[in-house]
Amino acid sequence: MALPRRITAVEISAERDRHVYHARIVEPEASTPQARARGNLHVLLNLSGAGGGRSRLSRQVLNVIQATYYEQTTGSVTQSLTQALLAAHDTLRRANVTTPQAVWQASVACLVVRGRDLFIGHAGPALSFVAHPDAVDLFPAKPPEAEAYLGDPSPPDIEFFHTQLRGDTTVLLAEAGWLGHASAREMAAVAASPDPDASADYLREIAERTGLACLVITIETEPEAWSHIPRVDEEPHREASAGAGEAIAGEDERFAQTRATVPIEEMSEPLSRARATPYIPRSVTRIPRTVPSREQRAVEPAEAPSQRPRPEPVMEPEVEIAAEPGPLPEPFRWEKPTFSVRWPAWRLPRISIPWRRRGKAEARIARAEPQGSSRWAVIVAILIPLMTALLVTGVYWQRGAERARQLQELIAGAQAQVVAAAESEDPARARVMLDEAEGLLEEAELLHPGLPEIEKLRLQIQEQRDRISQVQLLYLVLPLKEFGKGDRDPSRVVVNEGHVFILDRGLDQVDHYQLDETGDTLSPVGDEPLLKKGQLLGETTVGEMVDMVWVPAGDGRPVSALLVLDASGNLWQWAENVGLTSISIAATEQWRYPQRLETYLGRLYLMDPQANTILRYPPAGSDYSISPEPYFTQYVDLAGAVDFSIDGNIWILFADGRVLKFFQGERQPFLFTGFPDKFRAPVALVAGRREGAPTDRLYIGDARDGRIIEFSKDGAFIRQLRPSDPSLFQDMRSLYVDETNKVFYVLTKRGLYKAPIPAPPQSP
């Protein structure tokens, strides 16, 4: 399978919006788990609203999409994109609650390039053109009509499309408003054009006039992989049969698909769908790529602007979508009518005429010029550079003075907002002022990066945010283990009586460490990992790491032990003075994609979000060979669940910050109250327990801001805790809370940290 050789991306937007973040391009290092599982991410964001701080909010939304998408390297691309886009929706909803007069709305178009697979996701009105060597695909087939946006009271439908590379490919992501200024035919020609400069000029002219934005991604592939690419009319006609085709590697069965060639006269017939997936597929329009080459255009006479025919509107086919959900189809191909999509003549590149050497007659005429004319020519030649230098100096001085004036106004405005926020008694209003101040500082930094006044004001803004959000700083944060560079993807930490275990999904291993008597120094136990993928134990080979949990002795369990689950369905047990053994676990055929393990009163709980279930295994001595029972008594949608914890109740944390509470399989009422901030990337949930008994605390780890939020178990907000250096806990992966000894253990991408749990501040 050929892989892309090089990917380049160009953002097109209006010059007046140069401070607004429209796009995000993320290309993880090829050797990392994120690159292998998630590929490259390209995002186009169209954000509109009447409030200030648009630049800051745009950046925040793009950060949320990136962090949520790459948060986990398990599961499918569409699941991660769904969670990322829903997290962006929640971010805008919270912004609208804070400033209801702003009415923030957004549409997003995403492209994921993973191997030769292209995944496209839309939330809100958006368009995507994919220019293959032989045709241009339009997603969706019919122009998007008025529909829901991100930030509306209800989230918009999220549409997914899939296609594959067949050679060098260009993808154009655009907001739906472009069709009001250029036809689909013209946009397809832009995507298919062999002249990227002309394409950019054409798009930039429209962007300057309308304020629209788009993202052009060019994917160059290995030439030898595409020795022959059939034309549209060379594709064999095959009927679309439900359930045929092969699933894409690394994705679930919802992407099992059939490659169909559908003539235009059949496009009005209903398409059969298989009942196999919750996603409702959308059709696409394929426009044959018959754009003339640069050489062909160079010899064609250009038409006068007044003689240019107006482009005919593209008639889109009416495609009936079945009401029943089915597998996502590959883009349909039009066999006819075959029409030519051509650049307007006035947009053709200029033909450069080679310089012609002067003939002898011209040389004689030049030598016969009067001598006085030559002296004046010399004087003029000397004066022109001097005058140009003076003019340029004056222009630069004027621009410099103007930039200095703008810089002073921006800093003064930011300082005034910070002072007003400090004096405000309304937390919501104070946040708006701080957002405005941050936006002004971002503009000031573009004029003068690294200015000390800017950094000083940013510290004041952070102090104000901490005061409003009731943040308590952790000053005694001790690094226990720092990870070097490599393919590490730490995902879980377990601590028990001085033993520390770290599960790393990137290296597919479990490492065992021992704390010293002070608890401040960590030493490895042995020279090799405790458990590693590919390790042979008895006659069983260890598979990829999934999760682990510590099970205390008692309640039917004869010994305390660490349990580790691998993706092959094996359950491994490590007990002190016993070592590592394989133990039985029943009903693995019921699993779809288990993510998390937990334990309570000797029982083992397995959360499988894809199956929307939690299975409860009773202990059978030292193993779990008795068939499990489903915990829930009713249907529960676990899409987006990231962690869970048990203290008699089961608490489930979702990527959008929701927490559901269950008791004996029944959902219980639960809401957060008094929380002055918002969740950005929640990854860990711990229901407080001390010496086995539940306490009244609930802890949530937020990876985006590197903080721990503490609530009571009735949902009341208590405080936020973070290091004085916020970067220490950023990219958090796991949180272990030892309430007996009052210690946090925080596992991040970079290392393992320990911090004492401080006493809550006294109320005034």
Image: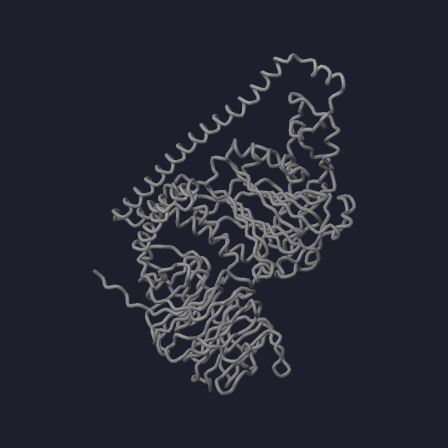
Seen in the picture, residue 499 relative to 381 is either above or below; the reply is below
Furthest toward the left, the residue is: 764
Residue 478 horizontal side relative to residue 359, left or right? left
Image quarter of residue 505: bottom right
Look at the image and tell me in which quarter the C terminus lies.
bottom left
Look at the image and tell me in which quarter the N terminus lies.
bottom right
Q: What is the x, y in percent for residue 759?
A: 28, 68
Nearer to us in this view, 706 or 246: 706
Residue 162 horizontal side relative to residue 93, left or right? right
In this orientation, does residue 662 appear? Answer: no
Nearer to us in this view, 146 or 683: 683
Q: What is the x, y in percent for residue 489?
A: 53, 65
Q: What is the x, y in percent for residue 401?
A: 39, 32
Residue depicted at x 27% and y 48% = 422
Nearer to us in this view, 367 or 191: 367
Seen in the picture, residue 736 relative to 85 is either above or below; the reply is below
Q: What is the x, y in percent for residue 688?
A: 36, 71
